[in-house]
Amino acid sequence: MAGRKKWAATLASTLFVAASCAAVAWADSKTYEDEVGETGRLREQTNLDIVSATASHTGAGKLKHTVTMRGGLKPNREYTRPFLFINRGDGDGGFPEWAVVGKAVFRIHYDNHDNPDFSRVGSASLTDERRTWTYKFDAATIDSVDATYGWRVQTKKGLAEDRAPFTGWVLHNL
């Protein structure tokens, strides 16, 4: 009987810790729902039309961003991959300070806003599944002094372009 009580107490404490961790992970996820088919070009090119984008954390200190498109992906065509732009702090600045493109994280330096300089500062993984792209990269890559950062995603091919959000930034905890 004492063994059962000990086992039950261990199980209860394990479940409490797991529930606490799940609550923290769930609370640290942010999803932005985008309009569908905002323009004629996006109605035609469904693989570029963003439906939703989510920022979250993995257990290994990585940031995870997923971007779901209205149509099926064409992963072998680089121009259909979404760009992830990041701005430190409250995200109220107009210009992005980092870009995650393909399998790389870039720091963007502005001497002239018409001609920014990109320097690679880290690696990212990019996976695709049906209609969803997933980026993962180390949170330490973003050397933000604040506990939050702003993000947005963008697709563009010719005249077909979509941004989520269209203006501004979605805030997320670093």
Image (tube, rainbow, N blue to C red):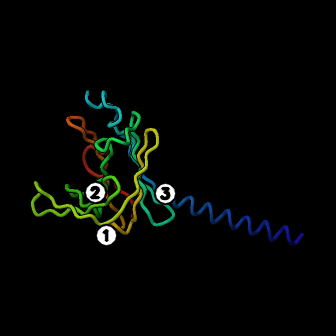
Q: Indicate the quadrant where residue 40 lies.
A: top left
- Give the residue displayed 29% in from the left and 32% down from the top: 42
Amino acid type, mark 2: Ala
Residue pointed to by mark 3: 27
Residue pointed to by mark 2: 99
The image shows residue 33, relative to residue 146, as above or below, that is above
Q: Indicate the quadrant where residue 47 lies.
A: top left
Looking at marks 2 and 1 on the same chain, the residue that comes earlier in the sequence is marked by 2
Labelled disc at residue 60: none
Q: Residues within 10 Å of mark 1 (few under 14, many from 20)?
A: few
Mark 2 → mark 3, Cα distance in angstroms? 25 Å
Image quadrant holding the N terminus, namely: bottom right
Q: Residues within 10 Å of mark 3 (few under 14, many from 20)?
A: few
Mark 2 → mark 1, Cα distance in angstroms? 13 Å
Labelled disc at residue 143: 1
Amino acid type, mark 1: Asp
* Left or right: where 74 falls relative to 113: right
Amino acid type, mark 3: Ala
Please provide percent x and percent y for residue 26: 51, 55
Please provide percent x and percent y for residue 68: 41, 41
Tell me the mark number nearer the camera, choosing from 3 and 1: 1
The image shows residue 112, relative to residue 49, as above or below, that is below
Tell me the mark number nearer the camera, choosing from 2 and 1: 2
